[in-house]
Image (tube, rainbow, N blue to C red):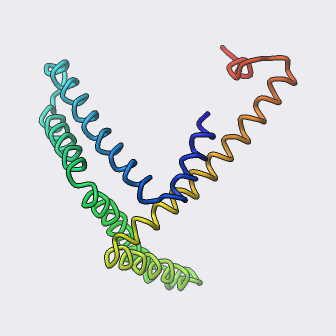
Amino acid sequence: MRGIIAVCFGISLLFSPMRALATLIILWGVFMIADGVFSVITWIRNRELLRRRRWLQWFAVTSITAGIFIFFSPVIAAVVLVSFFAFGSFAAGIINMMSSIALRRPAKGERWYILSGIASVAAAIFLLLNPIAGVITLAIIFAVYAISDGILLLILSFNLKKRLAAKGRTHFSQLMPIK
């Protein structure tokens, strides 16, 4: 079932990336609010047991606030999400280039590491200069991932079904030894 859902989600991302991303962003907001509410419930139920409840309180408030912000400003939330990817890519690129300089003496071929760093920094600059194009690009990347992951899960399920039939069993748990 996961495989079918992943393939359908990937196809919808490919054919309508902005609509699918809007749905993802809304689901992200719902998740943030639910996560914050469950953190509040955990904090209330376990006040005596939790020594660092200030962290849980802070997490709950920021999660709920972020979820509400996402609902009221989904475009800004998408740009923020792309910015996180951009800053992560930029930092990884700088670290790769610095590491390649440190590897200059003990290892040959460090220029590939430098090129990897340059590519990461270039991707970060592209994402920061044109975040909407970055959102669409990320949607396409997620689509390709979802479709390929879904296909692999479907192949796995068909192979497991064959193994079950070959052993005369009807459920996956019957393949697993129970101790």
Q: Choose between 38 and 51: the one closer to the eye.
A: 38
Residue 147 in percent (x, y) is at 61, 52
Q: Residue furthest right?
A: 166
Where residue 82 sits, quadrant-wise, is bottom left
> At 35% from the left edge and 66% from the top edge, which residue is drawn?
88
42 on left or right of 112:
left
Q: Residue furthest top?
A: 179
87 on left or right of 44:
right
30 on left or right of 153:
left
Disc tally is 0
> At 59% from the left edge and 83% from the top edge, which residue is drawn?
109
In the rendered image, the vertical position of residue 173 relative to residue 16, given as above or below: above
> At 58% from the left edge and 46% from the top edge, which residue is drawn?
8
Where residue 77 sits, quadrant-wise, is bottom left
Residue 41 in percent (x, y) is at 20, 23
In the rendered image, the vertical position of residue 95 relative to residue 173, given as above or below: below
Where residue 36 sits, quadrant-wise, is top left
Q: Looking at the figure, which quarter contains the N terminus?
A: top right
Q: Choose between 6 and 167: the one closer to the eye.
A: 6
Q: Looking at the figure, which quarter contains the C terminus?
A: top right
Q: Choose between 57 and 65: the one closer to the eye.
A: 65
Residue 63 in percent (x, y) is at 22, 42
